[in-house]
Structure formats: structure tokens, C-alpha cells
Amino acid sequence: MTFDLATIWAAILAFSIFAYVVMDGFDLGIGILFPGFAIGDERDQAMNSIAPVWDGNETWLVLGGGGLMAAFPLAYAIILPATYPLVIAMLLGLVFRGVAFEFRWRDPRHRAVWDIAFCAGSVVATLAQGMMLGALLQGIHVVGRGYGGGWLDWLTPFSVLTGVALLTGYALLGASWLIGKTGGAAQAHARRMAFQLGIAMLVMMAAVSAATPLLAFDYWRRWFAFPGVLLTAQVPVLVIVTAALFFRSLARGDERAPFVLTLALFALGFAGLGISMFPYVVPRAVTIWDAAAPEGSLIFLLVGTVAIIPLIIGYTAWAYWVFRGKAGVAGYH
């Protein structure tokens, strides 16, 4: 594998997408779980645990989407038309969630309505993201240099499966985040949720992992052909080990370890996605080199990105450090 500009940009986009998933994932997960929290202090603690960071987490979504358009314009021109309904649904869900977050405190007479909107926006945005992943993995019909499929080609049993899987994963991230950010009854409730969702996530990971090689022979070959299987087999082994450590940390009453180990499970899932896709940006149709922008454009973009990403990481780390304590129940302003 040569580390040319296209490969470097693929790594940058992969990092941006993973950063978005793990950061915005837990606050979307809190929205997904919101109806299960007790009205009053428990819901207020959940909201305040993400109040200082939730909007900053979405910076990575902008970087990922903008980077795809700038660095791999051909892929952007194919993927977006193939998934327009899902993109629109995701953006509307994020908008509803953001509006509900603010108005929940400023319009207490209709707080129940805003709680529903917060949950609905989180569920819709998550399902849309998961189904976009499923649509990409199952293949996009490409004709020439454009999308050649229909308006609803993305809607299949596999894309629904990946949507539900991401819904489960984000919910687990949210529950494990609350273990470290809340106390008392709220923390005990989050711990029970995390245990149940941990089992559900393992089931969903197994289901997606079993279904993906059946989509195309290329996926089967990447995972099971010798000698590559000696390397790829380590991924499910590490998933099992990480899951065992996760449940052990719950049983021991750890506060931070469950969230870190959930992130590790997501990282292993992301590694599996890389095994299935690389070097394709549109699986089995367009490679990263086919889709890359001209070399001069990639160099120009790289200069700015090398300066911007450390700044984003820096202010994000500072925000998390400043608000590292337990969440209270006072209203967010």
C-alpha cells in the first residue's frame, strides 16, 4: 500500500467520521434513551451531561462531509444522489434535536413536547446514518461517472439492519457515558441500561458481520480467504475480549471504563468496515484513486487541514477537561 495523497486523505476522512461517531454518538444515544429516564432530575442530569459539548461534537460531521466533497468529488457526486432521502432525514433530525435541546429549558410549559422532539430527532438522525452505511456497503449502482439507480434503492433489509445496529450502538454509548457523568439512582439506571444494551449491541454486531460477506464475494474473500483470514480473525477475537472486559467493568462498578470499552468496540467495528471497503470509497465501483481530486487541490486542502485538525482536537479536549465533573440538575442556559 502506497501512502500517496489519496490514501492520506482517505485516512483523514476515516478519522473525521470515526471522531464524529464516537463524540456525537453518545449524545444522540442519550436522546434515543430519553423516554426511559425518569421525568425530573434524571432527565435534567442526562441533558446537562452533554450541554457543554453536544454542538461542538458535530464539527467532525462538517469536516467529514466537506472533506468528501473537496477531496473525493466523484464519490460525493455518486453517494449523495443515492442517499438523498437519508441525508435530508439526518439533517432534519439533527435540526429538531438542536431546537428541542434549547427550547426544553426556555419553554418549560411545553417541556414534554420538546422531550419527544429531542428523542425523535435523535432516533431519525441515527437511523439515517446507519442506513446510509448499509446502502454504501450493499453497493451503489454506478453508470459512467454518476449514480444510475432509483430513488429508493437504499431501502433494503440490510440497510434497515445497519440502521437498527447503529441505533443500538449509540444507545450503548449514551448509557455508558451517563455512568461516568451521573450519580445515585440515575447512575444505577444507566448501568442497568448499559448491561442490556451491551448484549443487544453484540447481537447486532454479529448479525451485521454475518450478513455483510453474503452481499458480495469480494467481502467474503476479504474476510475468509487464506492467508488473510489469519489477520481478519483477530477482529472478532478482540471484540469478544473487549466485551468481556466491558461486562466485568459494569460488575465492578467502574465509572469510566464502560465508556472507554464501548469506544473500543466501535473502533473494532470501524476496523472491520475498513477491511471490507478499502481501497473503495464506493464499494466495488470507485476506488479512492478514481474519485480523488487533482493533486494540486489535494495538496492545497491538506495544508489547511493539517492546521485545522489540531485546533479542533485542542479546543475539544479543553472543553471536555473543563466540564469533566458530574452533571448537575440546574437548568442549562
Image: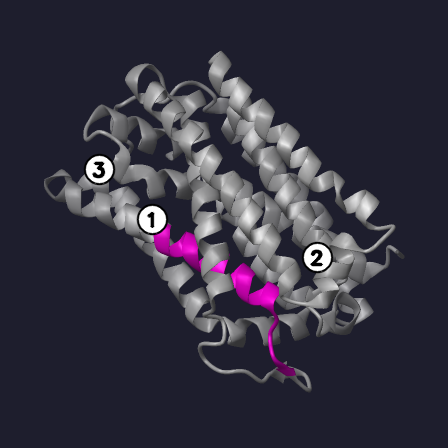
Which residue is under mark 1?
98
Label 3 near label 1: C-beta < 8 Å? Answer: no
Stretch in magenta: 123-142
Instruction: Say if the magenta span includes residue 274.
Output: no
- Is residue 319 visible to us here? yes
Q: Relative to residue 225, is residue 217 depicted above or below?
A: below
Image coordinates for residue 29, horizontal then vertical, percent: 41, 41
Q: Is mark 3 on a helix, strand or loop?
A: helix
Question: Residue 276 shows which numbered tag?
Answer: 2
Q: In this view, does 30 lie to the left or right of 5?
A: left
Is residue 308 shown to the viewer in this render?
no
Estimate the spatial distance between the alpha carbons at disc 1 and disc 2, rounded to whole Å.
34 Å
Marks 1 and 3 sit apart, C-alpha to C-alpha, by 12 Å
User: In the image, which is nearer the foreground, mark 2 or mark 3?
Assistant: 2
Three-letter code for the amino acid on which mark 2 is drawn: Ser
Q: Which of 166 and 216 is in front in this view?
A: 216
| Front position in the image: 70 or 129 | 129
Q: Which residue is drawn at 80% across and 48% down?
A: 229
Q: Name the residue under label 3.
A: 105
